[in-house]
Amino acid sequence: MKSMLKYLPILFIFMSLANAQVQLSEVLPDPAGSDTGNEWIELYNSENIPIILDNYSLRDESTKIFKLNNMTILNLSYLVVFPTFTLNNDADSVFLYYNGTIIDSMTYPQSKENISFSFVNGNWTETIPTPGTENYIDLNCDFSVKIIAEDIQGDFSFKIYVERIKGFNGNLSLFRIVQTPYGEIIEKYNQLNLTVITHKTIENSPSLENGKAYLINASIITECNDSNLENNNAIELVFLRGENEFSLDVPYARITQVYGKRYEFGDTLRVRVSINKGTSNKRAITLSVENLSVKNSFQSYTKSPQDFEIYLKLPDECEKKSKTGNYTLRLEAFGAMDRRIIEVFSNKTCNSEQTENIAVKYESGPCEVNFTENIINIGINFSTLEVIYESAQVKAKNMGVYAFSGLILMLLTGLVIWKKSF
């Protein structure tokens, strides 16, 4: 009996190590929306065998206990449980028990909506929720901005809706501008610094004249590394009705967005435009780049305002002999016009083309035509032509050969005459 008792400490240590294979992994005290029934605690089994949790329980700083009876956590897996007690959003602690003994615990400060506390690399830290999967820290974020507005009569207001798509750093700056379709600024709001946990709505009430069209521009700049910049800008075209009028008779053309900042020759531009035909009898819509001789033209018969994208392929720099620099993007529609400056650069080294003099004659006669041309594709049917000589360099080379041959012939003739004289 005494010999068996001496092994009890070893057995107790072994049981403690086995129980330690189940541990707290992640806690979400403040889920998006209602907290009731949506708070959860994640456990992790680092053992290579499934573990039955009948002797395990959870508790926070209150006296309520949540037993994990009839639950099993698979080997090397995560298990998400929804406790019956309520986790505090201000600050709280979570305890994991085995047979009434605490085997793991964690304490968190004030929580943020839809931000969890995860055990990563030996430390508890704020992360985006990853229920049932491995925890990780995502240093990137993604925030979007939208404009909520509608055509109204009377006092006008619009809303800016900023939403966190992923990440947990919610510090950002919001910029808002109201302008006419022709670019005249009507109202420019001061920069607004925000902290956005899940989403935030900002109401705006500009003083605008009824019976006219306006463009609302909203953009955000985040402190975190935003992985998707395309949803950081929003543009909305609104029309304010007067009591007995709806002034859309005036045609306009507006470049509302050019995707990207710098382009390489050969790239395809993606441009978003807003146009209105109004009472104009013109139908042509043309997007072009000045000094590059490229354009995309089509016709529209729609009288109501339109908002769509146009694609325009830039030329190859070697074909057009174009250089890196700023170019003017030009939109023309129904007699109205708008411009934007874009930067186009080149990474190519174009081969220099040699200029050669070519003489040709037609088979039908000995008529010779001399001309100078950059030989790329001169569009002549060479099956009916005979090349007399190809270039001035070739001609000079051939003349040298002829002169040398003539000299040798003269020497041989002189030698023969000299021998006959004897």
Image (cartoon, grey):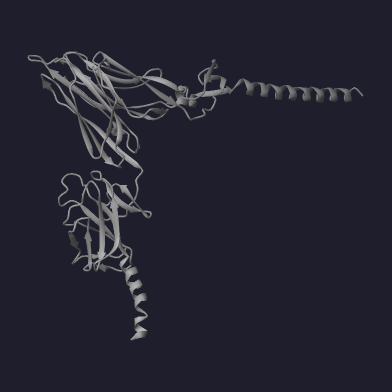
* Vertical arrangement, residue 138 with respect to residue 404, above or below: below
Q: Is residue 48 visible?
A: yes
Say which of 140 and 314 sits in front. Answer: 140
Image location of residue 324, percent across then percent down: 46, 23
* Vertical arrangement, residue 109 with respect to residue 417, above or below: below
Residue 421: image quadrant is: top right
Residue at the (14%, 19%) spot, across then down: 240
Q: Relative to 259, is 155 on the left or the right?
A: left
Say which of 228 and 36 sits in front. Answer: 36
Say which of 317 and 23 sits in front. Answer: 23
Image location of residue 344, percent across then percent down: 42, 25
Residue at the (54%, 20%) spot, across then down: 360
Residue lying at the far left of the rendered structure: 244
Residue 155: image quadrant is: top left
Residue 355: image quadrant is: top right
* Vertical arrangement, residue 208 with respect to residue 41, above or below: above
Say which of 72 and 386 sits in front. Answer: 72
Image location of residue 364, percent across then percent down: 50, 19
Image location of residue 254, percent across then percent down: 26, 20
Q: Relative to 251, is 134 on the left or the right?
A: right
Residue at the (33%, 86%) spot, across then down: 1
